[in-house]
Image (cartoon, rainbow, N blue to C red):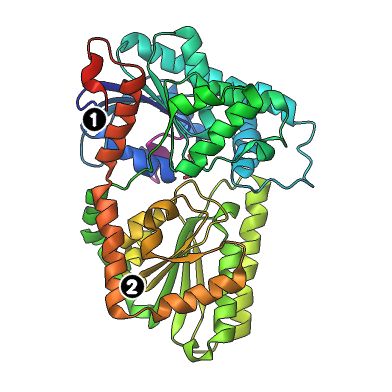
Amino acid sequence: MARGGPLIIASNRGPVGFRRGSAGAIEASRGAGGLVTALRALVDGNDVTWVASAMGEVEREIAGSGRRTEESASGSAFSLRLVAHDAEVYRRFYGVIANPVLWFVQHGLWDLKQDPGADLGPAWREGYVEANRTLAAAVVEELDRLPDAPVFVQDYHLYLVPALVRAARPEARIAHFTHIPRVGPDAWAVLPRDIGAAIHEGLLACDSVGFHTEQWRSAFVDCCGTLLGRGADAERVSHANPIAVDAEEFDALAAGDGVRERRDALAAGRPEILVLRVDRADPSKNAVRGFEAFGRLLERAPALHGRVGLLALLDPSREEIPEYVDYRAAIERAADEVNERFARPDWTPVSLVVRDDFLASIAAYLEYDVLLVNPVMDGLNLVAKEAPLVNDRDGVLVLSREAGAFEELAEWVVPVDPLDVEGQAAALERAIGVAGAERRSWLDGIRRHVRMHDMDAWADRELRELDARAPRQGAGATMQP
Ligand code: G6P
C-alpha cells in the first residue's frame, strides 16, 4: 500500500501499548485486539503516522509529550500520536457507548429488556461525540503536516471522525474500515434515530468504506437507505475486503524461544486429543455455549473420557464494563460445571486459563487437534486464520457460520450454528473423527488461502478502492483498479 508514501491511521487503541515495568521504566508491548494485530503489518514499508487514544495513566503521560517515534516488530519506524481524553469523556465513550451499546447492537447481543437508561443521550453527546471530536482534531493537525496523506479511520469507536475531518478539510482522502459485524436497520432501531443517522452519515463522509464480508456491506447499504434515504451513496462508496494475517510474523513467532518453552510445557501435560479455543473473554465469542457443547460431547461419547481435553485460553477484556464481568463469571461457572460432572483423579476435561499471554496462544495453535471457533457473531475472527497457519497436527477447524471468516473458509471446516449446543457437540465429535488425508487437505486449503490473501493484498486493495473513488492529485487514471 502506497509503499513509502505517508499514511495516517486513526484508531482508538494504538498498535503498541505502554505500561510501567517493575523497575519503574515505561515499557512498550504489543497492543491487544484483532484490529491492532492485523494493522500492525501496515507499519512496515509505509511512512505511517498513527493517531490513537491514550489508554491508562502511563499513556496519558506520554500523550503530553507529543508525537513520538516507535518501532514495529520488524524494526520499521513509525510516528505515534497519542491523544488524551478527559477521563469521564473516555469512560462514556468507551465504557458506555462504544462497547455496551455499539458492540452489542452490532453483534446481535442487544437485549431488548435492557434499559439503555437516561445515561444514553449524555453519554453519546459528552462521551462518544466528544472523543471523536478530539481524535478528529488530532487527525486534522497531522493532515496539515502531511497534506497528501490518505486517512485510514478504523472501526466502530471512530464512526464520526470521517465527517468531522471532511468538514475541516473537504479535500482530504478518507477511508474507513469496520472490523466488526454490521446489522440491518431493524437492529439499529433500538437506538435513538439521531444516533443511527449520525453514525451512518459519518461513514458516508468517506470516499471509501470497507467491511470484511459482502453480508456486512449490504447491511450497511440497507441501513443508509432506511435511515438516510442514501442507499445509492452507500452502494457507491462501499466494498468488502476480508482482513488478513501477517503470515511471516506468525512463522517467526512460532519458531521463537518463547513459544518453544510454552509448547514444551503444554505438550508434557496434553491429552491425547486436544480441543482448543482462543478468544478474548467477550460475550460475542460464545465460550459458555462452547463449554456446554463440550459437556454434551462427553455425555454422548464415553469412549472419549480420559482421552480428550478442552483447553480454553481467554484474554481478559474490557474488565471495567459490568456485562464483561458477569460474562467472565458465567464462563468460569460453565467450565467448572463440566469438570464437576466428568473429572477423574487422572483427568480434568476442561482447562480454563484467563490471561494475556499471546505466545502461549501460539504454542497452543501448534498443538491442537480440533480448534473450536463458535462466536455468536464475529466481524471476521482472526484466530480462525492464525491458528491453522502454524498448526503441526493436521488440526480441524470447527467454525461458526456467523463468523465473517466463514465466507472465505467454509469448504475446509466443520460448520456450526452458534446457538445450537447439541449441534456443536456433534460437530466436535465429527471433527475428532475426520480421517488423516482429509484433515491434511482441509488444513492445507486454509493455509493456501491465508497465505495468498495476505496483509499486503488487503492493504493494496484498500488503497486501490480509495484511489478509484478519490484519485491522488496527479495520479489520474493509472490508479484505477
Ligand atoms: C476486537 C475487535 C476489533 C476491535 C477491538 C477493540 O479485537 O475485533 O474490531 O477494534 O476488539 O478492542 P479493545 O480491547 O480496544 O476494546
The residue that disc 1 covers is: 77
Local SS, label 1: strand
The structure residue drawn at horizontal position 33% and vertical position 71%, both measured from the top left corner, is 367
Range of magenta residues: 13-23
x 55%, y 51%: residue = 377
Label 1 vs label 2, nearer the camera: 1
73 drawn magenta? no
Residue 78 is left or right of residue 177, and the answer is left
Kind of residue indicated by mark 2: Ala
The amino acid type of the residue labelled 1 equals Ala
What x and y, as percent, mark residue 402? Answer: 52, 54
Residue drawn at the location 55% of the way across and 40% of the way down: 182
Q: SS class of the residue under badge 2?
A: helix
Instruction: Determine if residue 264 is in view.
Output: no
Q: Residue furthest bottom?
A: 303
Image quadrant where one finds the C terminus: top left
Quadrant where the N terminus sits is: top left
Question: Can you tell which quarter of the image residue 35 is in?
Answer: top left
Depth check, front residue: 348 or 39: 39
Is residue 175 visible in the rendered image? The answer is yes
| Residue 22 is covered by the magenta coloring | yes
Give the residue pinned by disc 2. Answer: 265
Q: Nearer the viewer, residue 27 or 162?
A: 162
Residue 143: horizontal and vertical position, in percent? 36, 13
Which residue is pictured at 38% across the width and 83% down the height? 272
Position above or below: 453 against 5: below
